[in-house]
Image (cartoon, helix red, strand yellow):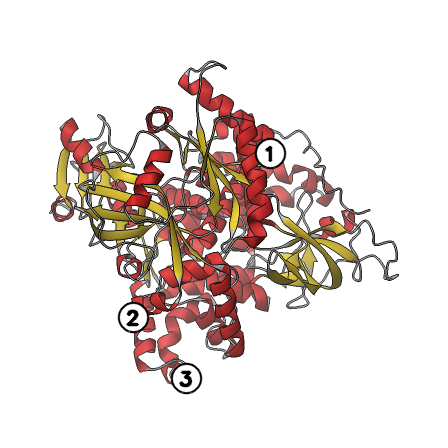
Amino acid sequence: MPVDLFETLDKPETTEAEAKAELETLRADIARHNQLYHGDDNPEISDGDYDALVRRHNELEAAFPSLASADAPTQKVGSAPSPIFGKITHALPMLSLANAFTREDVEEFIATVRSHLGLTADDFISFTAEPKIDGLSLSLRYENGVLVSAATRGDGETGEDVTANALVLDDIPQRLPAPVPDVLEVRGEVYMAKAEFAAINEERAANNKKLVANPRNGASGALRQKDPAKTAQRRLNFFAYATGELSENLGIAQTEVISELERLGFKTNPLFIECSNVDELVEHYEKIGTLRADLEYDIDGVVYKVNEVGRQKKLGNVSRTPRWAIAHKFPAERAITRLNAIDIQVGRTGAQTPVARLEPVTVGGTVISNATLHNEDYIRENDIRVGDLVILQRAGDVIPQILGVAPSDEDRSGREAYVFPTECAACGGHTNRPEGEAVRRCTEGLSCTAQRLERLIHMVSRDALNIEGFGSEAMSEFVEFGLVTEPADIFRLHEKRDKIVNIPGWGTTSVHKLFTAIEERRASPLNRVIYCLGIHQVGRSATRDFARKFQSYDAFIAKVDELIEARNNVEAVMHPDDWKKHYRRTISELAASLEMPGIGPEILGRLLDFYEDETSRAIADRLAEQMTIEDVIHKTTQSALTGKTIVFTGTLETMTRNEAKAMAEGLGAKVSGSVSAKTDMLVYGPGAGSKLKKAQDLGVETITEAEWNERAKPSD
């Protein structure tokens, strides 16, 4: 039967253990998609699918408050800034917005605002409404009316310095007319008009180049060019919609702020209006929805804000979002087309993911020919067959998905129900679908060609060994030419220099840079070495926990071997049928013996399976032989910083923010993201703003990055 487009089924009651496991998976998925969307401009799922992940995460945390985590990716904004650009610390964080999907959600938002402000039903409050531009957020800092810096959102606290590129945008004034505050941060959205996007793709198609996925990616890529001249070639636009740090207010209401921004020479959205109740807000939302297709830019919703600036400040923020604003998202766009084929893609962990190959159809101005089908259960439950007319949804203007068979498709082609293959689509090996899991996976591990490539790409990625300049294209080439077949080969590439320089696109200089980057990572921390192996469900948090617990690679491996032996000893005295029943209890007891709250039976089981497999173990051992795996050194008794709370602010010039955090924690200190009376020390670099001032006002010790490096030196 076709899927019901307007109903969702309640999930069965979830136990706390199940919720914990699901939250671990959700947090890893959300963090990954945050990086893909905000950092890499290469989203793999739709906005709608992403919103669903976040909603499910929040539902579980609400149902099980003890499992809530301040470190969850839902509590963070955007992604880490790219290392290509310099960094700018925002004087005031660039927050994200909570989402509303229905009128009821908007009513709840207004009720919450009234409640926090202590307003009665009769007390007047006004709101503003404006289109939510689907572009790239930008913060412009003016001092004495002159543009001095421009920064992307980044992770909300620190963004990329794109000042040189912002200077070539016609919509961004370089000098503001008087009167103007001494310090003024203007925030808004950089976007690429639909016509410019179409022209770029027409040009790229004519030159046989890969097409840009959507206008947002086009805007982001153009603004983040190393060469400002290339940015200038792409006609980018900018709408101002808010302010950041100010030496004096622009007005007492959002409407006044927008008017003042217009006077200063900024373009603001012409569909910005003031509203006094939910009816007016929703009416404007519906009006903008009817205009959406004819607008010269992409939008994905309407933003509502409390109009009075004083009330905005009183309402404040909750985690990563302001209480005084919300984004009312548009429903996904849909179309009906023919399903021509179902192909299977193989991921890093062997996941067999079905992809729909479609009769090309235009949805929201974009021609779609591929879409996700999620998994084999989804295909079976919705009885989706090759040849069917299917309902295609393009949610959030990114990755499309098949919702089900079109109700009107009564004249089916007569093809049989789709049977999900039991052999790996990449290597032909055996696949397995564990009980309780929705995904079928190839069991061949690194013997599988697709898994090998994806794991090798993962190994050199930013979160793993972070080998600069070693991207997926380079890895694919090296695998294709037989230069890399397993992780250890990466550290032996220098032996094949003569072959690499003869590959098109590789010259002496680029090869030298790559080899230098590889050598810089030959010595890497224990947690990154474990994580780079790409073990299913063993994420960054788990690898950090293992590193802190065992401190050295030898101790970690010794414990893994001990646990494998303990598991095998229990299995050896049991009948196979009994072992299936008792496996969960056994692995749970082994996990409990570690006394590591973040390591449950699922994670431990996957870890032991990996190291017990002879092929995987041999590959891991050969990698370890090529590397210097750095021990975790705790200096909690010898450091004067033990127990101190430290805040880093401004642009750090000799290390990344993560490296600074690791250094402080290694000295026994705790790193915080905000300044309070409990802060012991603030380390500041260029661009430090409100945090430095607050620390000085509170009498907190403040030191420069150079002074910090001196204090952090190991004692003789």
Residue 2 placement (x, y as % from top left):
79, 47
Residue 487 placement (x, y as % from top left):
45, 66
Residue 419 placement (x, y as % from top left):
79, 58
Q: Which residue is mark 2?
A: 516
Q: Is residue 469 visible?
A: yes
**Relative horizontal placement of residue 85, taking residue 614 as reference (left or right):** left
Earlier along the polypeptide chain: callout 2 or callout 3?
3
- Disc 2 to disc 3, how far (Cα)? 17 Å
Earlier along the polypeptide chain: callout 1 or callout 2?
1
Q: Which residue is mark 1?
A: 102
Please determine whether, in this image, residue 299 is positioned above or below residue 675: below
Earlier along the polypeptide chain: callout 1 or callout 3?
1
**Amino acid on which the number 3 mark rests in the picture:** Lys
Q: Which residue is mark 3?
A: 499
Closer to viewer: mark 1 or mark 3: 1
| Res 588 → quadrant | top right
Q: Residues within 10 Å of mark 2 (few under 14, many from 20)?
A: some
